[in-house]
Amino acid sequence: MYYVKVGLASCGIAAGSAAVYERFQQELTPDVTLQPTGCLGMCYCEPLVEVINSTGERYLYGNVTDKDVLRILSTHIRDGNPVTELLVDAPSTSDDDRVYFAKQSRFALQNCGVINPEDIESYFLVRGYEGLKKALLNMSSEQVIREVEQAGLRGRGGAGFPTHLKWTLTRKAAGEQKYIVCNADEGDPGAFMDRSILESDPHSVLEGMLLAGYAIGASKGYIYIRAEYPLAIKRLRTAINQARQHELLGAAVLGSNFAFDIEIREGAGAFVCGEETALLMSIEGKRGMPRFRPPYPAEKGLFGCPTSINNVETLANVPRIIDLGCEAFNRYGTEKSKGTKVFALAGKIKRGGLVEIPMGTTVNELVFSIGGGISTGKAFKAIQTGGPSGGCIPAQLGDTPVDYESLNKIGAIMGSGGLLVMDEDTCMVNLAQYFLTFAREESCGKCSFCRSGTEQMLRILNRITSGMGQLSDLDLLADLGEKIKIGSMCGLGQTVPNPVLTTLKYFRHEYVAHIQDKVCPAKQCKALIDYQVLAADCRSCGICKKSCPVGAIIGEKKQVYTIDSSKCIRCGLCVNSCKFHAIEVFSLPKEVAVCMEVQS
Amino acid sequence: MQSLSAEEIVIIKEIVAKHVGSPGSAIPILQEIQKELGYVSTAFLRQVAELTETPASDLYSIVTFYSQFRLEPLGKNYIQVCHGTACHLAGAERITDSLEHETKTKCGCTSENGEFTLEKVACVGCCSLAPVVNVNGETHGRLTPEKTAKVIENLRNKGNEGNGDVLR
């Protein structure tokens, strides 16, 4: 008897796992049970297929195409010989090769890639809703809150506010009607932790909301989720319907006198709605403009009622803390940052994917041991956590432990879990410009510092990347950045200068190179780079000329081609098209470039 | 001003009726209208305003605040270029250039013949497949400018199929 699981979360499907699943369905024999599952975390080798034999041994196949399905079925399942060249993890894999999993501790992600996210029975098999049963039968609301307090759980959305405090405040606030809101508006570009949890283990989030509702005395919960996550929304709807059928949601949860129901609200595309007061405005059907705090949502939140807003990952941790006790959680982590944290590893990294590490793991362990180092083979330059609100951490601070306090100390933040890895080809000024472009577009416009300040900072950055900057611009950037932080009301404005401020702090020399030498050291900023054909390598095939969309490449077949710099739009298509690597990008100080032109 | 067809009025009335008495339902109503009719024109807004006794200006303020809403219908093929951080590092800019060049459409616009709508988004969350483009709801990953050109060529060859109801 064999179990075959196929990872069918969004990134798996994008890589082609739906076709693999269909193929298995067509070829299925009676001795095989096929099960769709969620995210297995190894995004770098999707589509993933796991084969489990009758003794429970697990064989994980990566980069599986629909053409490999027959081979797995005949060689492994019929003849008992695993297809070694597709294996990424197996009982025989040595510990050295298992580092991707060995250094992780899966707590919030425990069920992801294990259960069938669309089947509540599958969740029951992994002690699903046992935490809720325990709470309703044997624990008071205060006891639930105390367990979460002793676990040391802090908000996983980024700020790290202690969860039990939020719940206690909401519980004690005056008012009959209270709400629990799950913040699933995962807007940071480059972050997909919450999406993966919702697509792979939606019931754990529902159970977390039920426990939170029980703890604070709420009878209604809202999940505010990005409309860009259609699969997560679909699976949540399925999960909610199943929970209602099993009386886990409704007027009498599990026959008790606790009533609770959950409604989904789809976001409509506004980054600022990840900020809690803006999120509440959006659920109320208005423009998502943040409002001044206090009063905090715990006192006056949704529709004016006390409301606790918790992040997806925070809530997914709660059922297991209640079911297994606080020690199961707080045995991981550091003194002040307990438990684990999920990160979405992306960028120039070999093994990009979804990882969960104990707090206190160092940046280097994360990048090199788990992530396998830099994908391009070039030098590791920096990581960026927390997206547009976060900061960069340069390679020389790679020993920094990943916990709330240590990251704050060096000017970065934990953030919600997006973790971007950069190599020496990444221009830090360009990165700062990218985040600020995003921030300017997403500022709601309420506070003038955020609205106009980001615009002014962006103009300065545009000036610098186009070679028109002055050294005094750097002081101006730092000054304006600090003022936006002080002069803005909500978390967006208070944090969006961070990418500029931290790159200025750690990579000031790159800014200076752009300004003084008119050079982009990473050769990314279009205004500061040029392309040239290397005469020695050019085979005069003419492919580059064909690929150029603006006719900037001059020459005839059998001659060395040249590039007319005045026409060239620096799109890089010619570099890609040349099989002989005969086109080079360079960024040189202007005087040197002029000299070269004169010489030639 | 655009006048509504009888069918459109029925659809809008049905959607609004579903949300009677539910607080804060302006956004879900507009989302459902867009899903059914493809966009939310000012004429649709006026109809909703009348039915819900909300000022049309309130609804307009919502539609212009959130990036999901469209005041104009989509082109036949709806292409979203991801500009999340991972895609940015992996060259989303070049993919956009290539798409603009191939479709002869500016990002954020619909082509004159109505064949393509090009849009920037951040982020679709498939970072390990960067750079990524969503074409009529289907994700294409690990793109290069050449592969992008092929995607467009395939769309053209497919002819009239378009996004149909997939994306609405």
Image (cartoon, grey):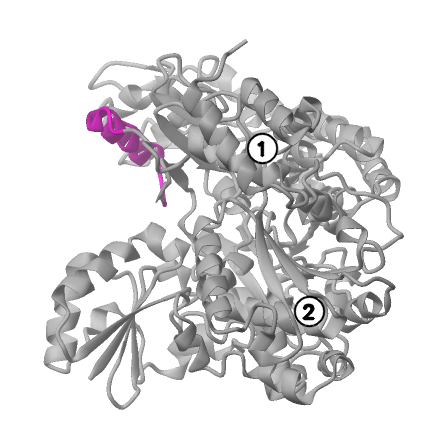
Q: Is residue A168 above or below residue B117?
A: below
The answer to which of A68 and A425 lies nearer the viewer is: A68
Secondary structure beneath dot 1 equals: loop
| Label number found at residue A213 | 2
- Residue A523 in view, yes or no: no
Q: Chain of mark 1?
A: B
Residue, far top? B1
Look at label 1 and name its amino acid. Answer: Ser
Q: Is residue A115 left or right of residue A48?
A: right
Q: Quadrant of residue B8?
A: top left
**Of B74 and A66, the residue lying toward us:** B74
The magenta segment is: B141-161
Secondary structure predominantly adopted by residues drawn in magenta: helix
Chain under callout 2: A
Q: Amino acid at mark 2?
A: Gly
Residue for badge 1: B67
Q: Quadrant of the C terminus of chain B?
A: top left
- The correct choice, above or below, for A384 with respect to B151 in the image is below
Give how far across and how far down residue B79 sits, in percent: 40, 31
Q: Which mark is residue A548?
A: none
For disc 1, the neighbor class at 10 Å (few under 14, some 14 to 19, many from 20) is some
- In terms of depth relative to the viewer, which is nearer, A419 or A594? A419
Disc number lying in front (1 or 2)? 2
